[in-house]
Amino acid sequence: MDSNTPCVSFIGIVDFTEDAKWLYCSESVNDLLGFEPQELIGKPSLDLVHPDEFPQVRAIHYTTIKQDQAAVLVYMRMRHKDPTKGYILCAISRTVCQNVLVGSVSFASPGPKAMHNASTAQEVTIITPTAKDFEFRRWNDPNPMPPCPVPDLAPPSPPGSASASPKSSRSTKYDPVHAAPMRFAPLPEQSVRTALILDRFSMNCNILYCSNDSMISTTKVMGRSFFDFVIKKDEDRVRSWIDVIKGWGVNERGQPSDGGFGFGKFGILVAGRNSSDRSPERAPARHRHTHGNNRDTHSRGHNPTSSPTRPRARVRAEPQEQSLVVDAIFSAHSDGLMVILRPSS
């Protein structure tokens, strides 16, 4: 591997328009493609695509959204700002998060890390012909986060028409270029998912970005520890997952980079809590001694009125904190950790 190879990954978020305009880029885009984030925000991400691959990339952008896909990977070329460096072969991950497409862009280099990334992705698409060796196939591996049901917005086909007849997904090979229109209006929102970007260099994994308010409020989460929103009984388990993901997200030189996808299920607290208090939860008092004395009084034949007992105070029930069980996709990148949440079915 060339010593100047940019073995990094940056986090990118694009919109649902046909040009896939940049909404967010993390700082490592400069290391990989030579641009500063502010040079790209609001510009079409497809402007960086190699001309030979443009039709396929636009078609994949469309079908990724329409199929509400998550944790999918594509190998394609992206233009470097420096014309002398031409186009860089990149591995691009994508997940639909309700009204945006989130993911990462990393330098594609062969080796164990590339195999790991491909083996944890839900789908791998090769666009650049020279990247065919990155393809990875598994035998009957179930999808840990299948697409959510999304209402079909297309008008119903008239009875008896060809499009109304049942189709087999295995009968013909799917061709995204011919399945997707070259021009289309911004696509509607998909199923409920929220993307969080976490500080991977801190123990508390503070939240740097939240894509929407669908499950937790953006104004409540920004700057707070991610673990403030993980229910206490799941915190140790989620911390161990994140430690594993951080370990995956290290390149051959020991630098922070991408590292495939991890999947899990846990509970979140909508309003959050103070996770810095790591003391164990107290067991509720059972008042067995008091009840035992009452039983003894009756068993000895004493008149209950002769030894009056204090009336029991009414205990006000504590309000239940609103919680949700979520499915999550974890991934590591040079500039942070990404967590995709959706309500678990």
Image (cartoon, rainbow, N blue to C red):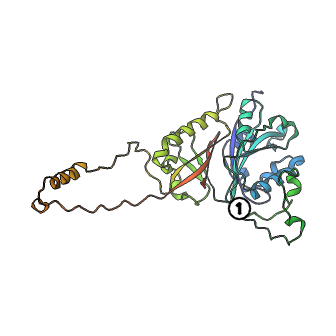
User: Looking at the rendering, in which quadrant would you find the C terminus?
Assistant: bottom right
Q: Is residue 6 visible?
A: no
Total numbered labels placed on residues in the image: 1
- The quarter of the displayed image where residue 80 is located: top right
User: Looking at the rendering, in which quadrant would you find the N terminus?
Assistant: top right
**Looking at the picture, how far across and down is residue 279, in whole percent?**
38, 42
Residue occupying the far left of the picture: 306
Residue occupying the far bottom of the picture: 158
| 170, 151: nearer the viewer | 170
Q: Indicate left or right for 293 with 269 as reference.
A: left
Q: Is residue 127 visible?
A: yes
Q: Residue at x 89, y 69 (%)?
A: 161
| 161, 335: nearer the viewer | 161
Q: Indicate left or right for 223 with 37 as reference.
A: left
**Looking at the picture, how far across and down is residue 171, in whole percent?**
87, 52
In the image, residue 224 sits, relative to residue 322, either above or below, namely above
Q: Residue at x 54, y 59 (%)?
A: 217
Q: Identify the amino acid type marked 1.
A: Val
The kind of secondary structure element at disc 1 is: loop
**Looking at the picture, how far across and down is residue 48, in whole percent?**
81, 48
- At label 1, counting other C-alpha atoms closer than 10 Å, the crowd grade (few under 14, some 14-19, many 20 or more) is few
In the picture of the structure, the residue carrying the numbered disc 1 is 150
| 164, 280: nearer the viewer | 164
**Looking at the picture, how far across and down is residue 102, in whole percent?**
69, 51
Q: Indicate left or right for 68 with 233 as reference.
A: right
